[in-house]
């Protein structure tokens, strides 16, 4: 259900952004709003409280965001509240952000390495990713995982390139376990 809600509203927001020529503006606004709702737990508690009626929740949202958010974004939020889906607002924004990134050919790569990468290594990875994909820009998210021993693992969407020593050792172990030793 949650995926259907995020897709339905996210697609509607994306179509509105395209039709109104506000892709960049709504993209930036969605990122900021997502940060706000992820940080503000009190707002989520209030919006999900069963004793606060929908109209009151909508009034609260209008008071908080009027003049700070676009009328398109406020209208979307009011509609989501009216349908009782405030819990899904974050996933709607995330879905929309993903749609815009695909539209603008901005990839997101998650890069794990055994130790901190130098700026030159990071730049080399970025250039290699741009050369080998259809993306024109990348958001690179780095993570240090000492269990990799060495090398890197890159994940873009559902694709994974695993060049870690850990996976090489695992493959070698698997191959060696298949070898039967013959005794004279």
Image (spheres, helix red, strand yellow):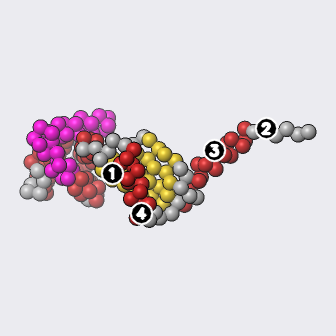
Separation of residues labelled 2 and 1 (CA atoms): 46 Å
Instruction: Please tell me whether mark 4 or mark 1 is closer to you in this view.
Output: 4
Q: Which residue is mark 4?
A: 120
* Residue 14 located within the stretch drawn in magenta: yes
Q: Sequence order check: which comes first, mark 4 or mark 1?
A: 4
Instruction: Please tell me whether mark 4 or mark 2 is closer to you in this view.
Output: 4
Separation of residues labelled 3 and 4 (CA atoms): 29 Å
Q: Sequence order check: which comes first, mark 3 or mark 1?
A: 1
* Residue 4 located within the stretch drawn in magenta: yes
Near mark 1 (Cα within 10 A), the count class, few <14, some 14-19 or many ≥20, is some
Can residue 37 be seen in the rendering of this structure? no
Near mark 2 (Cα within 10 A), the count class, few <14, some 14-19 or many ≥20, is few
Q: Position of residue 141 (x, y in %)?
A: 38, 56
Asked if labels 1 and 4 touch by Cβ distance under 8 angstroms, the answer is no
The quarter in which the N terminus is drawn is top left
Q: Residue furthest right?
A: 184
Near mark 4 (Cα within 10 A), the count class, few <14, some 14-19 or many ≥20, is few
Q: Secondary structure at mark 1?
A: strand
Q: Which residue is mark 3?
A: 171
Tell me where the magenta segment starts and ends, as one range.
1-30
Separation of residues labelled 3 and 1 (CA atoms): 30 Å
Q: Secondary structure at mark 2?
A: loop
Q: Nearer the viewer, residue 20 or 1?
A: 20
Separation of residues labelled 4 and 2 (CA atoms): 45 Å
Query: Main SS type for the magenta part?
Result: helix
Q: Sequence order check: which comes first, mark 3 or mark 2?
A: 3
Instruction: Give the number of the disc on residue 32.
Output: none
Q: Which residue is mark 1?
A: 138
Q: Secondary structure at mark 4?
A: helix
The quarter in which the C terminus is drawn is top right
Q: Position of residue 125 (x, y in %)?
A: 42, 54
Q: Position of residue 32 (x, y in %)?
A: 22, 56
């Amino acid at each position: 259900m949650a995926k259907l809600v995020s897709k339905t509203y996210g697609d509607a927001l994306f179509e509105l952004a395209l039709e109104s020529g506000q892709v960049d503006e709504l993209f930036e606004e969605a990122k900021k709003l997502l940060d706000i709702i992820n940080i503000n737990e009190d707002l989520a508690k209030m919006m999900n409280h069963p004793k606060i009626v929908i109209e009151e929740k909508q009034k609260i949202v209008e008071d908080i965001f009027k003049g700070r958010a676009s009328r398109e974004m406020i209208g979307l939020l009011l509609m989501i509240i009216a349908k009782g889906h405030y819990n899904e607002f974050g996933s709607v924004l995330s879905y929309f952000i993903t749609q815009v990134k695909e539209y603008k050919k901005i990839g997101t790569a998650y890069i794990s390495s055994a130790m901190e990468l130098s700026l030159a290594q990071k730049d080399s990875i970025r250039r290699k990713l741009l050369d080998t994909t259809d993306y024109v820009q990348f958001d690179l998210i780095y993570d240090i995982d000492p269990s990799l021993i060495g090398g890197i693992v890159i994940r873009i969407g559902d694709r994974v390139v695993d060049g870690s020593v850990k996976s090489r050792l695992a493959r070698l172990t698997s191959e060696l376990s298949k070898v039967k030793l013959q005794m004279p």
